[in-house]
Image (cartoon, grey):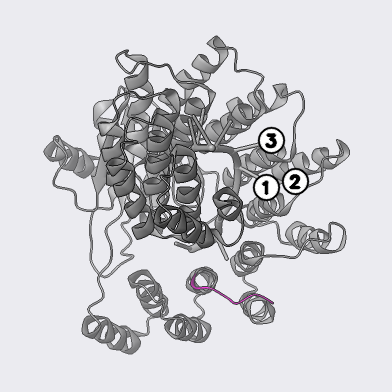
Amino acid sequence: MIRAYAMSVKPERGFYVYRDMLRAGLRPNGVSNSFVLKGFVKMGLVLCGVQVHGRVLRDGFCGDGVLMTGLMDFYSGSGECRDACKVFDEMCVRDVVAWNVLVSCYVRNRRTRDALGVFDRMRSGGSGCDPDDVTCLLVLQACAKLCVLDLGERVHEYIKDHGYSHYLNLNNTLVAMYSKCGQLDKAYEVFKEIPNKDVVSWTAMISGFASNGRGREAIDVFREMQRMGVLPDEQTFTALLSGCSHAGLLDEGRLIFDSMQKEFNLVPNIHHYGCVVDLMGRVGLIEDAYDVIISMKCKPDATIWRTLLGACKVHGHITLGERVIEHLIELKAQEAGDYILLLNIYTSAGNWEKVIELRKIMKEKGIHTTPSASTIELKGEINEFKVDDTTHPRIKEVYEMLNEIENQLKIGGYIAEITSDRLSYHSEKLALAFGVLATPPGTKLRVAKDLRICIDCHNFAKMLSGVYNREVIIRDRTRFHHFREGRCSCNDFW
DNA sequence: ATAGGGTTAG
């Protein structure tokens, strides 16, 4: 009964049955506890889960590994990472599933860096079990998120050595991992060898090309997919449309958006619309993009307005920018970055009165910018830098190197552009300076950043790639930038 | 009875 409710749309009823069971003097066993927990996660009933935890301990089920693992997953799904870890630590016997739930917990709860370590912890013995296919899959997701190619490659080797090579879900994840680490060739190599590619495989590859700015190839893969008779789904179109927008393929994007509705009978969701708005905004069809948002059947969210605001910035469209801010305020979703963007629109238009007025408003509202962070991986070590970082152990050398690089770049014609209301050292500049400092000349630099790269840092990286003859790959929040010989593969800034 | 594939505009 509890099981039936847990799987249904009314999992809380499972709790009532569970409660009645207790009142009737029956002791729930591990199985009923597991099911009732699953229902709580779905409902977000954290306190109910905690009550079950208490009962589990009282009834002496703490030696039940399956139940404790279920409890871990319950805490993990409720966002209580620390409690999940506590249960894990208190377990006397941990099987591979318990370890996997731990990794899954880290990945789901933004502790991706902790997830990376688990693979080696399991392998170094003492854990009592070896990573299995699920461990590999989860760790690969973590590698993809953090752009840690080194470990991703080791997991790939492990997969080959342990006879998992034919697992479709692992291959699909490998394609995504290599794509997200900027290794498109490797991704394609894996993709090519998959015997029975399904919609997920194709979507992973399309997305790989898309996020690396190779929209045409993304479309080619999509055509090939259709020739092979695999039906695309909503996610395929999200990937495809984002590819069109990153590559500025307006006509292609429009055709695809049309065909997904007419040919494939799919209803566009907010992501699809978002890509179309981005695409139109990028090529300067700002008013059209606005009309798209207004005509949407679903309610516009803050992100889609922000996409349009970004386009207003690029094309210096003041009046529409102000209108967009109004929409964001109406949604009570305006953030520091939005005001900065509007500020930049005023600044580049030379509208100083508005600049002063907006600065005043921002001060009154107590708006601060949130610092972002960049990471660079060297020999398996992950080095993290924040804006104006002071915490990295080699920070003094980094600033010295950064100064030297800036002097070198100035000779080459680099002019620092002020993009926010104060001049600061963005985290990606620090990460790049550290990379130049800590690696031999000519080594490729791979940086991951949590926000979007600004035009100044973009210019900086572009120049650096030429002057220092270094290939630079920066993965920002939305896409990849491959810098080589003073150029970038993207057309975000022009 | 417990873990697990691709996507998500700025």
Mark pair 2, 1: CA separation = 6 Å
Mark pair 1, 3: CA separation = 17 Å
| Image vertical order of residue A219 relative to residue A124, above or below | below
Q: Does residue A299 show up magenta in the picture?
A: yes
Secondary structure of residue under mark 1:
helix
Q: Residue furthest front?
A: A24
Q: Are marks 1 and 3 in contact (CB under 8 Å)?
A: no
Residue A441: x, y in percent? 33, 24
Residue A106: x, y in percent? 37, 40
- Residue positioned 52% across, 79% down in the render: A317
Q: Which mark is residue A215?
A: 1
Left or right: where A371 falls relative to A304: left
The subunit carrying tag 1 is A
Q: Which mark is residue A432?
A: none
Left or right: where A264 falls relative to A156: right
Which three-letter amino acid code belongs to the residue tagged 2?
Answer: Ile
Task: Please name whichever residue, A113 or A286, is drawn nearer the observer in this view of the structure.
Answer: A113
Left or right: where A161 falls relative to A59: right
- Residue indicated by mark 2: A219
- Residue indicated by mark 3: A201
The subunit carrying tag 2 is A
Mark pair 2, 3: CA separation = 15 Å
Q: Which residues are magenta?
A: A297-302
The subunit carrying tag 3 is A
Q: Are marks 2 and 1 in contact (CB under 8 Å)?
A: yes
Q: Residues within 10 Å of mark 2 (few under 14, many from 20)?
A: many
Q: Write down the quadrant of residue A269 in the picture.
A: bottom right
Q: Are marks 2 and 1 on the same chain?
A: yes
Which three-letter amino acid code belongs to the residue tagged 1?
Answer: Gly
Q: Does residue A399 show up magenta in the picture?
A: no
